[in-house]
Amino acid sequence: MSLPGLLPSARSFSWYLQIIFTWEAGAIQTKKLYGVIGLDYNDGFIELSETDYYGNLIYQEHARLENHGMGNRAESEIREKICAIVKQALSKKKPIAVEDLDFRKKKAGQLSGAGKRQNETLHAFDYSRYKETLENATFRNNVGLIYVNPANTTKIGVEKYGKRKLSKHQAAAYVIARKGQGYIDKLPPETKNKDSKKQKAL
């Protein structure tokens, strides 16, 4: 924190105190060697999956987001959820992994019906705030934040880990965590063949 001192106000010729808070980057306190916490952000919730040293799934959590838009409630809620997640990551010495994506492109296909454009704008704003809040919280707490390639995250999760009775979002968060840890999950050959046939048919 720095205190530049008292500054004069040109309008009223009064004085006001300006206080500036700054954070210096400290040493990262987390290591992906211990495992990674993967987050899958969606409309209305964040899915969390945690891995151990071997990339095995050891814990999951579902964090609901009840508020949207620019209101104080929405801002307070996302800060509270992210703060809890970051504290959890710090206590376990594990970094957080998220998808490096354009939210509007990924989620646009999930929105339909009246007000689609309004919804896309709203959800894009929510994601932007989520991302900024997460980046700030991890930086202040010296928690590593890993961005991973979002390609086929959900498909891989469903195909490889869906049999474990995981929802597609739980499976996606698990794949994100494994990607962040350095493990490579690929689509089974039969799934690739099916996708190729669909593209040819189109």
Image (cartoon, rainbow, N blue to C red):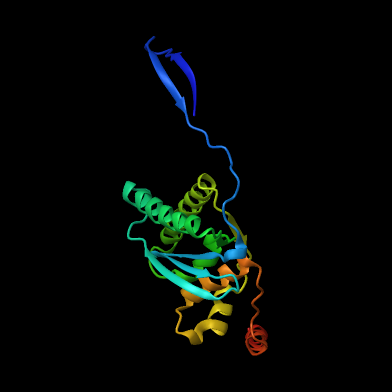
76 lies above or below 177: above
* Picture quadrant where residue 126 is located: bottom left
Horizontal side of residue 3 vs 14, given as left or right: right
- Does the image show residue 69? no
Q: Is residue 12 above or below residue 137?
A: above
**Residue 183's x, y, as percent?**
65, 72
Residue at 65% x, 90% y: name it: 190
Tell me which corner region of the image, top left, top right, bottom left or bottom right, holds residue 189.
bottom right
Q: Nearer the viewer, residue 14 or 136?
A: 136
Quadrant where the C terminus sits is bottom right
Residue reaching furthest to the top = 13
Relative to 84, say whether 59 is above or below: below
Does residue 128 show up? yes
Residue 179 x, y percent position in the rendering: 62, 69
Q: Position of residue 104 (x, y in %)?
A: 52, 61
Q: Position of residue 15 (x, y in %)?
A: 39, 13
The residue drawn where x is 55% and y is 76% is 56
> Is 195 or 199 nearer to us in this picture?
195
Residue at (35, 53) in percent of width and height: 77
